[in-house]
Image (cartoon, rainbow, N blue to C red):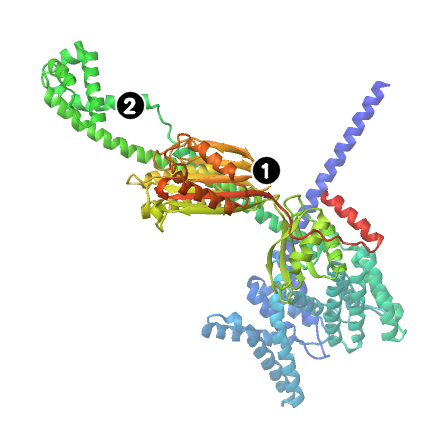
Amino acid sequence: MKTEKSNGTLLATGAFERINHVQARLQVSGQALKNMSKTLFFEWGLLIALVGFLLGRAMILAELTPFILPFLASVFLLRRNHALIASIALLAGTVFSYHGEIFFALIGMAIFLLLYRGAKTFLDQPGKALPYLVFGASILTRLGLVFVTTGTISQYALMMATVEAGLSFILTMIFVQSIPLITGKRGGQALRNEEIICLIILLASVMTGTIGWALNDVVMQHSLARYLVLIFAFVGGAAIGSTVGVVTGLILSLASVASLYQMSLLAFAGLLGGLLKEGNRIGVAFGLLVGTLLIGLYGDGGGSIFATVAETGIAIALFLLTPRSWLRSIAKYIPGTVEHAQEQQQYLRKVRDATAGRVERFSSLFQTLSNSFKVQQKSDEEQHSNDVDVLLSHVTEKTCQTCMMKEKCWVQNFNQTYDSMAKMVEHIEVNGTMNDPKLQRQWRSHCRKPDQVIAAIHMETNQYRANKELKRQVQESQRLVADQLLGVSRVMGDFAKEIQKEKQPHLIQEEYMVDALRGAGIDVGHIDIYSIESGRIEIEMSVQCDHDNGEAEKIIAPMLSDLVKETIILKREEPRFYANGYSHLSFGSAQAFVMESGVAKVAKGGEWLSGDNYSMIELNSDKYAIAISDGMGNGEKAYLESSETLALLQKVLQSGIEETVAIKSVNSILSLRNTEEMFSTLDLAMIDMNDAHAKFLKIGSTPSFIKRGNRVSKVEAGNLPMGIIPEFEVEVVQEQLRDGDLLIMCSDGVLEAKRSVENREQWMKRIISEIATDDPQEVADIILERVIRSEDGNIIEDDMTIVVTQIKLHKPKWTSIPIHPKVQKQKKGRAFFKQATGT
C-alpha cells in the first residue's frame, strides 16, 4: 500500500513538472511570437504596407482620392526608411481598386518629391511646408491629367481638383499626428482629444479602402466600423464611443452616399455601448446591437435588416475575440480610463521612487562625508606628549647635535636632560618667557650652552603655540563641516521617507463629506482628503462660500469637526482660486495646546538698544521654540552678536536639523568667526504642541522658572556661552508642562539686578509666586517692574529681557455643528465614516 502511494505521489509530481514545463515553453513561445510580430509589423514595415494598400484603394465622393499623397508625405517625413514600402503599397492599392487612379498616384508622387527637393533647397525646415507641398502636387497632377485627357479644364474640374487638394492638405496634418500612433514610435503619454480624432480619421480612411468587399449584402467596411466603435466605447465610455461613431460614420458617408445613415447608427451605438460598459464586453455588444436594430430599421426601411444584423454580428464576434491585453494597451492612452489612471500612477510612482532613491543616495553620501571629516583625536595628554617630543627634537637638532657633550647629556643623563627641557617648555608655554630662576640655575649647571638652548626653546615653543592654534581651528572647521553634513544627511533621509508616503484613497469618506456639506446647503465642488489620521487630518476642497462673514471658519470647519469627531480649523483660504469662481480651502487638525506669550525688556541705563534679543518660532505644525540670546556686554556690538546668534539658530532649526546639532553648528560658527572676546548666551525652549513636552537647552544662560498654580520650579543646566570653546556636549533638560503653566525665561540682567541678595534664584521664585494674574504680558511687566524697583535709585545696570509663555489647552472658537441625517441611509453612511476613520 505504501509503495502504491509513493508511486502515485511520484506520478503526480512528474505530471505537475511536465505541466509547468509546458507552460514555461508556451510562455517563451508566446513571447517569441510577440517579438516576431512586432518586428514584422513595425520594424519591417508590414503595417505601413497594409495601411498604404487600403488607402490606395480608398475613394470619396465617387471620384476623389485625397489619401495617397498625404500618406506618402507623412511616411516620407516620419519614417523615411519605409517610404519605398509605402509607395509600392499605394500603387498596389490603386492597381487593385475600382477607381483606376494609377497614373494620378505615379505622377503625384513624382511631383511631390520634386517639390520637396526644391523646398529643401530654399527652406531650412521643409517639413513645416509639407501640407502646402502636398496641396501643390495634388492640384497640379489632377489638373494636368484633366487637361491631357480632355484638352480643357472646366469649372467643375477646377472645383473638384481644388476640393481634393484641400482635403489632401488637411489629411497631411492629420496623418502626421496619426502615423506615430500606429507605428509604435510614440511614447506612453496619454492621447489628447485632437490626437484621438486624428487616429479615428486615419482608421476610418483605411476602412474606406475596403469598399467593394462584401459577401451577398454584408459589407466589410460596416463591420469594421462597428468593431472600431465597440473597442473605443468599451475603452473610453459613452463620450469617446459616440465621438468615434460620428467621425467614422462621416468618413464612410463621404466614401459612399448610401452609407449616410451609418453616421447616426454608429454614433447612437457608440453612445449606448459606452453607457453599458459597466456590463463589460457583453454590455457594450448589447448596446451596439440595440442601436443597430433601432437605427437600422429606420435607415433602411427594414429592407436589409438581416444584412445589418449580420454586419453587427461580425463586429461583435471580432470584439469578443480581441485579446484583453490589446484592449488594456489601448486604454492606457485614453484619458479618464482606469488603465490610464493606473499607468499614470505607476509612472508617478516610478518617478517618486527614483527621486526618493536619489535623495537617499545623497543622504548616504553626506553621511559618509560627515564620517570622513570626523578626525580620530588622541587624548590631550598623549597629544601633548607627542608635541613636546617633536618640539624637543627640533631644539636638539639645532643645538645639541653640534655639542661635544651630547653623549654625556643624552646618553648618560637622558632622563634628567629630557625632564629639564620639558619643564622649560611647559613654563614658557604658560608664561610666555623663561623667568623661573630655579629652572634657569638648574639648567645652567647641567648644560654647557644654556642660553643657546633656552633661545631655541623660546623660538620653537612660539611656533608650536601658533601651529597648535591653527590646528585647533582646522579641527574645529572639520567638526563644523561634519556636523552640518550629518544634519543635512538626516534631513534628506527624512525627506526621502516623506516622498515615499502615498496619498491613501479615501473615496468613500470624500463622497460622504460632499453629500453632507451639500445637504447643509454649501456649494462644494470637490474634496480631497490627504490624511485622516487622528491629530494629523488634512482636507482640501473647492467651495463657493461667503468670505466676508467667515463661512469657512464658522460653518464648514465646525461641520467637519462633527464628522471626524476632532477639532478641525481653517488653515488656508484662497478666495476665487478656480476659474469657476470657487475658492480653495485647506483644513487641518487643531493642535492640542496653544502658546500665548508676553515680553518685557529694557536696555542698560534706559537706552534704546539692548544687547538682549528674543525670538518665538513656529518650526512646523508640531513644535514651538522660544529663545533668548544675551550678547556679551551692552550696546550695538552685543545687540548684533545676540541677534546674529538667533538668526543663525532660526535658519538651522527651520531647515529641519535636530536642535542639539543645530546649537553645536551655531556654536562652531561663532567660535570660528570670533576674533574678539565677544560671546553670547542662548536660552532655548522647544515645546511639542501635541503633548506640551518641553526640552530646555541652556547655553551659558540663567535658570528658567515654571509656575504651576502657587508652586514655582526651576529649570537649569550648566553649559558655557556660545563661541568660547569649539566643542561641547549640550545638556538637555526635559520637563512635562501642563495646561495653565507659565514658563518664565529671562536674561542674566534680571537675576543679577538684586546684588544684595545672596540666593537670587529664591528671590525670583518669591516674586513669581506673589503675582496673582496669569496673563503672560502682565506677568512679564510686573516682574520687570519689581526687579527695577528692587535697587535703590531704580538704576538699570544691565540689559533685561523677560519672556513669559502660557501653555493652554486649545479651545476652539466655534463649537462643532452636528449634521442632522435626513434619511436612514445617511445615518448608515455616517456610521461607516466613523468606522473608516477610527473615530
Q: Judge left or right: residue 25 versus residue 180.
A: right
Q: Is residue 457 above or below residue 255?
A: above
Label 2 is placed on what type of residue?
A: His
Q: Which mark is residue 35?
A: none
Mark 2 vs mark 1, CA separation in Å: 51 Å
Whichever of labels 2 and 1 marks the residue nearer the N terminus, that label is 2
SS label for mark 1: loop
Sort mark 1 into few (<14), some (14-19) or many (20+) by Cα contacts within 10 Å.
some
Query: Does residue 639 sit above or below 219 in this rendering?
Result: above
Q: Which mark is residue 738?
A: 1
Q: Quadrant of the C terminus?
A: top right
> Residue 99's quadrant in the figure?
bottom right
Q: Nearer the viewer, residue 664 or 580?
A: 664
Residue 94 in picture, x, y percent from top left: 68, 72
Q: Is residue 185 visible?
A: no
Of residues 776 and 558, which is closer to you in this image? Answer: 776
**Which mark, by number, is residue 384?**
2
In the picture as drawn, the residue positioned furthest to the top comes out as: 412
* Residue 37 vs residue 344, the one in the foreground: 344
Residue at left offset 64%, top offset 56% = 553
The residue depicted at 70 percent of the width and 43 percent of the height is 27
Mark 2 Cα-neighbour bin, 10 Å: few <14, some 14–19, many ≥20: few
Which residue is found at the position 59% from the left and 78% from the top?
Answer: 135
Residue 439 point in image, percent of width and height: 16, 17
Indicate the position of residue 208 as horizontal and vertical percent values.
Answer: 73, 71
Foreground of the two, 626 or 149: 626
Horizontal and vertical percent position of residue 374: 39, 32
Quadrant placement of the N terminus: top right
